[in-house]
């Protein structure tokens, strides 16, 4: 029972299954051959800082600070 995942998938007709598998593999290879290469303009990396870095209200957790102040006062 340890090799349940290694068994072949049950098929009704071995020849039809082989034909189907071969056709799918050929279709996959054809798609790989006809795939367009990535243009050079898309291969550049954007190393600039995100726009949200300068938004301090997103970096500081105001609610947490408020809760800490209230806890310290009590």
Image (cartoon, rainbow, N blue to C red):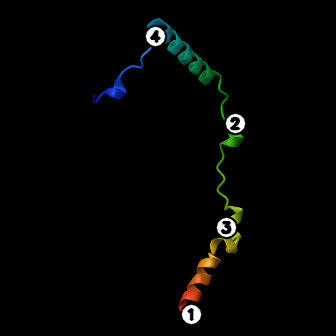
Q: Residue at x 58, y 88 (%)?
A: 69
SS at circle 4? loop
Viewer-nearest of labels 1 and 2? Answer: 1
User: Which mark, residue 12?
Assistant: 4
Q: Residues within 10 Å of mark 3 (few under 14, many from 20)?
A: few
What residue would you read off at disc 3?
Answer: 53
SS at circle 3? helix
Q: Quadrant of the C terminus?
A: bottom right
SS at circle 1? helix
What residue would you read off at disc 1?
Answer: 73
The answer to the question of whether label 4 and label 2 lie on touching residues, with beta carbons closer than 8 A, is: no
Q: Answer with mark 2 or mark 3, whichever residue precedes in sequence.
A: 2
Q: CA distance from mark 1 to mark 2?
A: 60 Å
Q: CA distance from mark 4 to mark 2?
A: 45 Å
Q: Answer with mark 1 or mark 2, whichever residue precedes in sequence.
A: 2
Viewer-nearest of labels 4 and 2? Answer: 4
Q: Nearer the viewer, residue 1 or 69?
A: 1
Q: CA distance from mark 2 to mark 3?
A: 30 Å
Viewer-nearest of labels 4 and 3? Answer: 4
What residue would you read off at disc 2?
Answer: 39
Residue 23 position in % (x across, y down)? 55, 13
Q: Answer with mark 3 or mark 1, whichever residue precedes in sequence.
A: 3
Q: Residue at x 71, y 63 (%)?
A: 51
The answer to the question of whether label 2 and label 3 lie on touching residues, with beta carbons closer than 8 A, is: no
Q: Nearer the viewer, residue 25 or 5?
A: 5
């Amino acid at each position: 029972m340890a090799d349940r995942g290694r068994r072949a998938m049950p098929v009704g007709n071995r020849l039809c299954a082989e034909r189907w598998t071969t056709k799918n593999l050929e279709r996959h290879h054809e798609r790989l051959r006809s795939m367009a290469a990535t243009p050079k303009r898309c291969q550049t990396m954007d190393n600039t800082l995100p726009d949200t870095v300068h938004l301090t209200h997103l970096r500081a957790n105001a609610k947490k600070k408020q809760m800490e102040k209230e806890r310290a006062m009590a």
